[in-house]
Image (cartoon, helix red, strand yellow):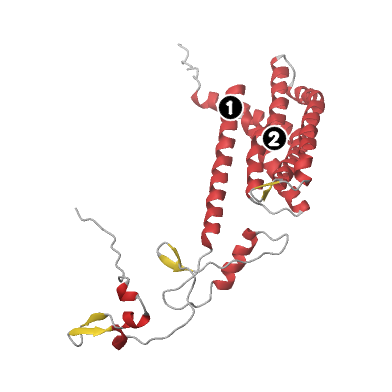
Amino acid sequence: GEREIELRSSFTLEDRSDIDTVLDFAIWSPVRQAFVPIRVLADLDFGKGPVSIDRTNRRTSVVVNVDLKDGLAAREIYPRVGAALEDMAFPRGTGWSKGQDFDRQQEDDAALLLAMVLSIAFVFLLIGMLFESFLLPVGIISTVPMAMFGSMWGLWITGTPMDMMSGIGLVILVGVVVNNGIVLVDLVTQLRSEGWERADALVEAGGRRLRPILMTALTTVCGLVPMAIGGSSFIGIPYAPLGRTVIGGLLVGTLLTLVLVPFLYAWIDDFAAGARTWAGYVFGPRASVEPEET
């Protein structure tokens, strides 16, 4: 088959010993049908050239570095840069892009999103197997968006930008915040299996599990406080956003779990009972009534 082979050619040392030697080098002229020196076809001029030539995807490129003010994140600047350069006319053959850092950031965001979706899916399947139901996990998983709302609120209050560490904190939060809902729903299920009414079981489980839920949440928050207020970092990336993300999500998620999870449990239970009744009516056997003999 056809093969593409890269070839490079250069002058010998004798042919490029000085500028006059280079200009006297003979090349073929299609117009004169003869070899002529380069000085006949070129104008000689001296000027400053780049120290190095950078290429991106085989195209010559120049990297422009911008120093940001304190408290300003790169992801906040990209939309402004795009709006400013969108209507700018560039010479033919030239253009602009947001650079490799932006592309790398997009890849990191996509990877974090995939990790978050997979973590929610795995937690959902695990809870479904434990409770032998695919409806109850919906109420427990609802604590995840509650916690994420708390994380966004905590980052906004502290003026912390959303970065890679914050994204990792959200992924960690998925596995931590559902523990409260699991503990609460598990006790409700046990009480109902013992003959308790649903409303009484929800009230009793809330009273029994209130102290353990608050204790576990507060101990986790207290353990993350040094990280949230400290200045430690890894290869230039601070840890503080991770701690603040988990703390905000855990606080709000815990409080909303105690209020909304019982409500969602009751709503899902009513929905399941209605679905079973409807399915029994539609697909269940019907008694046939024969006319009486006269």
Outermost residue, left side? 33
Amino acid type of the residue that numbered disc 1 sits on in the rendered structure: Leu
Left or right: residue 240 versus residue 38 is: right
Quadrant housing residue 24: bottom left
Query: Which residue is pictured at 53% across the width and 76% down the height?
Result: 88
Compared to residue 281, the image places residue 106 above or below, namely: below
Q: Which residue is mark 2?
A: 177
Residue 108 is situated, as x and y percent measured from the top left of the image, at: 55, 49
Residue 249 is situated, as x and y percent measured from the top left of the image, at: 72, 41
Residue 205 is situated, as x and y percent measured from the top left of the image, at: 77, 24
Q: Secondary structure at mark 2?
A: helix
Task: Please name whichever residue, 109 or 26, is drawn nearer the observer in this view of the structure.
Answer: 26
Q: Is residue 257 visible?
A: yes
Amino acid type of the residue that numbered disc 2 sits on in the rendered structure: Val
Task: Please name whichever residue, 180 or 232, is drawn nearer the observer in this view of the structure.
Answer: 232
Using the image, tell me which numbered label, if any, was put on residue 126: 1
Task: Please name whichever residue, 146 or 64, is drawn nearer the observer in this view of the structure.
Answer: 64
Q: How many marks?
A: 2
Q: Badges 2 and 1: C-beta atoms under 8 Å apart? A: no
Residue 84 is situated, as x and y percent measured from the top left of the image, at: 59, 72
- Mark 1 residue crowding within 10 angstroms, few (<14) / some (14–19) / many (20+): few
Compared to residue 155, the image places residue 47 above or below, namely: below
Give the CA distance from mark 2 to mark 1.
15 Å
Q: Secondary structure at mark 1?
A: helix
**Nearest to N terminus: mark 2 or mark 1:** 1
Query: Which residue is pictured at 32% across the width and 80% down the height?
Result: 21
